[in-house]
Image (cartoon, rainbow, N blue to C red):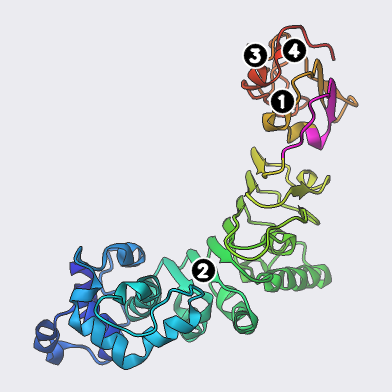
């Protein structure tokens, strides 16, 4: 909190809101410094050496003393005079939300209060010229549009995107924010609504069309696209394949790591499969992770064909098959590359497993295992111990398979 007070004393007085004053200052300390407060925004970083926004991002978890917010009379006064408490009551879906504010139930609004505190603090302390990481709500993004041209160093953006008609209207204002962050390399988005990344696909399409019309063989327009390398996409509701594909298609030439995760927070459970991977061309992608506790993940068969540099693929959902009578399993091509031992938890009678992979000169490569429990063939190593990286497709069988397949582990596998 001391660092925050130091920074706020250098922020424009008009940006230091009543909530920031109530939380960060006593009345006496604020009044003592009133005459020293700047009246205009600073054109340089308040503390150039310190990445202070990283500190601010974690501040709300410990901003109040152990005795709680109830003992802060200025904070209680803020809630009473601004109507914030009543506003929280209209947003809260909990029937037990208190009807009237008292010194004993201020904690009921604490989560929303922390969110509002962080929003106001981020705005007050944000110096675009020195900001490298930014965390904001999509509903607050319009406030930064006047500053976005000054985000020359911003390379990491964490954004929460809500649901409903209001959020969908706000999403229309996101494109001028995102695509003007010329140094943006990392996006962390929490989605509750529809596809907010259509703009990236449209810009990619326009970019490619201009290149096709150009007589030059050099892609002179690459600098106009956002150079995103890392995307972490989390779904708070139902997972949808469209935004997953929009990111892959919009940032395809630069994307290196792509993580997708989903969990059930509200609404009906997801029963429809999540299908994604259409039109992917990701020459630099080396890591792909997709996990969900809801529904079933379905990767299109040609997806990995557009990811020639991929090194690590993790796909996990909560829909294991129950196949207690299965005795023979043959996986070829993409299914073999994505094979995971969790598939075999119920296949206790399996006595033959074939895993094959196509490669350039021969039609298939089949992998032989003397003992599944003992280990597996290392990537790029054939049975004679020699390496041939051009012909052997990367594949590693999980050591735990021996414990899952007692019949298979007791005998030599024929392929």
Residue 393 position by quadrant: top right
Secondary structure beneath disc 1?
A: loop
Residue 292 location (% of width, % of height): 64, 50
**At x 84% / y 20%, what residue is drawn?**
327
Near-viewer residue (234 or 385): 234
Residue 152 visible in the picture? no
The quadrant of the rendering that contains the N terminus is: bottom left
Identify residue for label 4.
407
Q: CA distance from mark 2 to mark 3?
A: 45 Å
Residue 351 visible in the picture? yes
Q: Nearer the viewer, mark 1 or mark 4?
A: 4
Q: CA distance from mark 3 to mark 4?
A: 11 Å
Identify residue for label 3.
373
Q: Earlier in the sequence, mark 3 or mark 4?
A: 3
Identify residue for label 2.
159
Q: Is residue 17 above or below residue 410?
A: below
Q: Is residue 227 above or below residue 285?
A: below
* 328 inside magenta stretch: yes
Q: Nearer the viewer, mark 1 or mark 2?
A: 2
Secondary structure beneath disc 4?
A: helix
* 290 inside magenta stretch: no
């Amino acid at each position: 909190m001391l660092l925050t007070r130091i920074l706020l004393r250098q922020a424009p007085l008009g940006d230091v809101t009543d909530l920031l004053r109530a939380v960060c200052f006593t009345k006496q300390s604020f009044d003592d410094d009133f005459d020293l407060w700047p009246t205009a925004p600073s054109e340089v970083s308040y503390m150039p050496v310190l990445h202070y926004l990283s500190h601010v991002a974690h501040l709300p978890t410990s901003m109040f003393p152990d005795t709680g917010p109830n003992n802060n009379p200025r904070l209680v006064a803020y809630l009473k005079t601004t109507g914030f408490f009543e506003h929280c009551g209209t947003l809260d879906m909990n029937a037990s939300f208190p009807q009237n504010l008292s010194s004993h139930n201020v904690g009921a609004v604490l989560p929303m209060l922390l969110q509002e505190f962080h929003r106001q603090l981020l705005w007050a302390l944000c110096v675009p010229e020195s900001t490298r990481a930014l965390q904001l709500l999509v509903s607050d993004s319009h406030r930064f549009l006047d500053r976005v041209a000054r985000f020359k160093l911003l390379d990491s953006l964490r954004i929460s995107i809500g649901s409903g008609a209001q959020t969908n209207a706000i999403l229309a204002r996101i494109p001028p924010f995102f695509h003007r962050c010329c140094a943006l390399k990392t996006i962390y988005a929490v989605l509750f609504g529809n596809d907010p990344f259509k703009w990236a696909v449209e810009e990619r399409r326009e970019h490619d069309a201009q290149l096709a019309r150009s007589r030059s063989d050099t892609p002179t327009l690459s600098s106009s696209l956002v150079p995103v390398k890392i995307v972490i996409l989390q779904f708070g509701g139902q997972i949808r394949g469209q935004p997953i594909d929009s990111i892959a298609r919009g940032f395809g030439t630069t994307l290196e790591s792509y993580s997708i995760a989903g969990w059930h927070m509200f609404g009906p459970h997801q029963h429809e499969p999540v299908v994604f991977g259409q039109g992917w061309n990701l020459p630099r992608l080396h890591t792909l992770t997709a996990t969900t506790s809801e529904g079933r993940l379905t990767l299109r068969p040609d997806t990995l064909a557009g990811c020639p540099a991929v090194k690590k693929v993790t796909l996990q959902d909560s829909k294991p098959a129950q196949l207690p009578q299965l005795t023979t399993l043959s996986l070829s091509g993409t299914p073999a590359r994505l094979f995971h031992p969790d598939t075999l938890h119920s296949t206790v009678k399996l006595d033959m497993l074939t895993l094959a992979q196509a490669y350039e000169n021969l039609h298939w490569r089949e992998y032989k295992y003397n003992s599944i429990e003992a280990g597996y063939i290392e990537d790029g190593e054939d049975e004679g111990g020699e390496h041939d990286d051009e012909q052997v497709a990367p594949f590693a069988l999980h050591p735990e398979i021996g414990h899952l397949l007692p019949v298979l582990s007791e005998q030599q596998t024929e392929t």
